[in-house]
Amino acid sequence: MSENQQDLQALYELILNRKKTPIAGSYTDYLFTKGLDKILKKVGEEATEVIVAAKNDSDAEFIYEVSDLAYHVLVLMAQRGIDLDQIKTELAKREGLMSKTKERNEIKKL
Ligand SMILES: N=c1c2ncn([C@@H]3O[C@H](COP(=O)(O)OP(=O)(O)OP(=O)(O)O)[C@@H](O)[C@H]3O)c2ncn1[C@@H]1O[C@H](COP(=O)(O)O)[C@@H](O)[C@H]1O
């Protein structure tokens, strides 16, 4: 990993650290202080911004919004007490599984 790439595990640990040891002026601390509903609101907003950016041509804007969402999801995970290893374990269970697309009946127009 290049020096200019954020390590997700390190970021998650920094977020956990903010939860354990609040720091004045920290945005992460601000989110934890506001609580779950505020964090959920931010995740919702950031997800919407990803959707809007994905429809636009700018890769930079899309990357920016996905990064905002990733950070806020990590804050949500920390708030819920779920760590990255638990997500990796869940993803590993799916490795090699064949996805099944369901046969769906055509929607009939009324
Ligand atoms: N990756 C991030 C990160 N991504 C986005 N953000 C913040 O997320 C906010 C999103 O902007 P918005 O305009 O949606 O929100 P806002 O108006 O600032 O605040 P709201 O009242 O709407 O919540 C901005 O304030 C960004 O600074 C982040 N804040 C922190 N980090 C990482 O977390 C570390 C610790 O940050 P602090 O907790 O601030 O020390 C930092 O060093 C970074 O590595």
Image: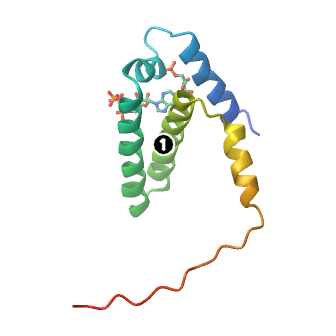
Q: Is residue 46 left or right of residue 88?
A: left
Q: Is residue 84 left or right of residue 79?
A: right
* Amino acid type indicated by mark 1: Leu
Looking at the image, what colour scheme do you see? rainbow
For label 1, the SS is helix
Q: 101 or 72: nearer the eye?
A: 101
Q: Quadrant of the N terminus?
A: top right
Q: Quadrant of the C terminus?
A: bottom left
**Residue occupied by mark 1:** 69
- The structure residue drawn at horizontal position 58% and vertical position 79%, both measured from the top left corner, is 101
Q: 42 or 59: nearer the eye?
A: 42
- Note whether 19 is above or below 66 in the view shown: above
Task: Say whether mark 1 is within 8 Å of ligand 1.
Answer: no
- The structure residue drawn at horizontal position 40% and vertical position 57%, both measured from the top left corner, is 51
Q: Position of residue 20 (x, y in %)?
A: 58, 13
| Figure disc tally | 1
- The structure residue drawn at horizontal position 60% and vertical position 22%, both measured from the top left corner, is 16
Q: Position of residue 57 (x, y in %)?
A: 42, 62
Neighbour class for label 1 at 10 Å: few (<14), some, many (≥20)? many
- Note whether 48 is above or below 107 in the view shown: above
Q: Position of residue 53 (x, y in %)?
A: 40, 55
Q: Is residue 6 visible?
A: no
- The structure residue drawn at horizontal position 76% and vertical position 54%, both measured from the top left corner, is 92
The quadrant of the rendered image in which ligand 1 is seen is: top left
Instruction: Name the image quarter holding residue 109.
Output: bottom left
Q: Is residue 100 visible?
A: yes
Q: Position of residue 55 (x, y in %)?
A: 39, 63
Instruction: Name the image quarter holding residue 100.
Output: bottom right
- Note whether 31 is above or below 94 in the view shown: above
